Amino acid sequence: MSAPALLHTLFSYRAWANDELLERMEGFDAERDKEARHAAIRLMNHCHVVDQIFAAHLVGMKHEFSSDNTAETPTLQELRAAMGKLDRWYLRYVETLTPALLAERLPFDFTDGDKGFMSREEMLAHVVTHGGYHRGEIGRLMRQQSVTLPWDTFAVYLHQAEPSRRLQEA
């Protein structure tokens, strides 16, 4: 599988996993699980902010963020809509990349002012792995509150997206 094809699959998985988790986060009880629910929304909002920051880096634009989270906490519904929109942006973006563009190293500034250089491929890998890390953190919060977890592994996604994989012989 080529790097562009793999990136498309990974970003399709990421969009699916984000949506699955955000849907299951509705299972937090607004009163009983108030603190855990708030922490989970803040973590997903952090992911969304970082995703926006790296989207700006990828296209060479300045972003509006001075931190890796926002002062205000969005509602779960607002966050789900915004993340879905950005997930679709990433899917369209990775479809435009050639191997040369993937390898290109881009300068950027971190929110703390430090300078950085990463290739587009490295930035995209960061976005995928960063989100997975925080979805795992939220999964732990959900488990502690007895909220049903999504079964959001990459293998599950592949077999749901392509049911014919279950019919393949070794």
Image: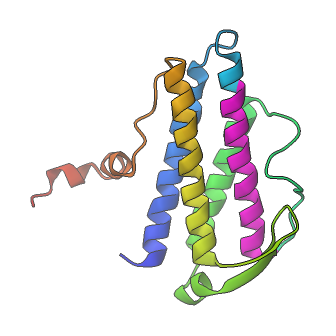
Q: Nearer the viewer, residue 29 or 35?
A: 35
Residue drawn at point x = 40 percent, y = 78 percent: 2
Q: Is residue 146 above or below residue 130?
A: above
Name the chief secondary structure element in magenta. helix
Report the side of 53 relative to 102 (left or right). right
Q: Is residue 164 above or below residue 6?
A: above
Residue drawn at point x = 59 percent, y = 44 percent: 134
Colour basis: rainbow
Q: Is residue 53 covered in magenta?
A: yes
Q: Position of residue 10 (x, y in %)?
A: 47, 60
Q: Is residue 157 above or below residue 31?
A: below
Report the side of 112 relative to 51 (left or right). right
Q: Position of residue 57 (x, y in %)?
A: 76, 71
Residue 21 appears anywhere in the view: yes
Q: Position of residue 62 (x, y in %)?
A: 87, 69
In magenta, the rendered stretch is 38-60
Q: Look at the image and tell me in which quarter the C terminus lies.
A: bottom left
Residue drawn at point x = 30 percent, y = 49 percent: 159
Q: Look at the image and tell me in which quarter the N terminus lies.
A: bottom left
Q: Position of residue 65 (x, y in %)?
A: 87, 56
Q: Is residue 30 covered in magenta?
A: no
Q: Is residue 166 above or below residue 62?
A: above
Residue at the extreme left of the image, as rendered: 169
Residue drawn at point x = 67 percent, y = 46 percent: 83
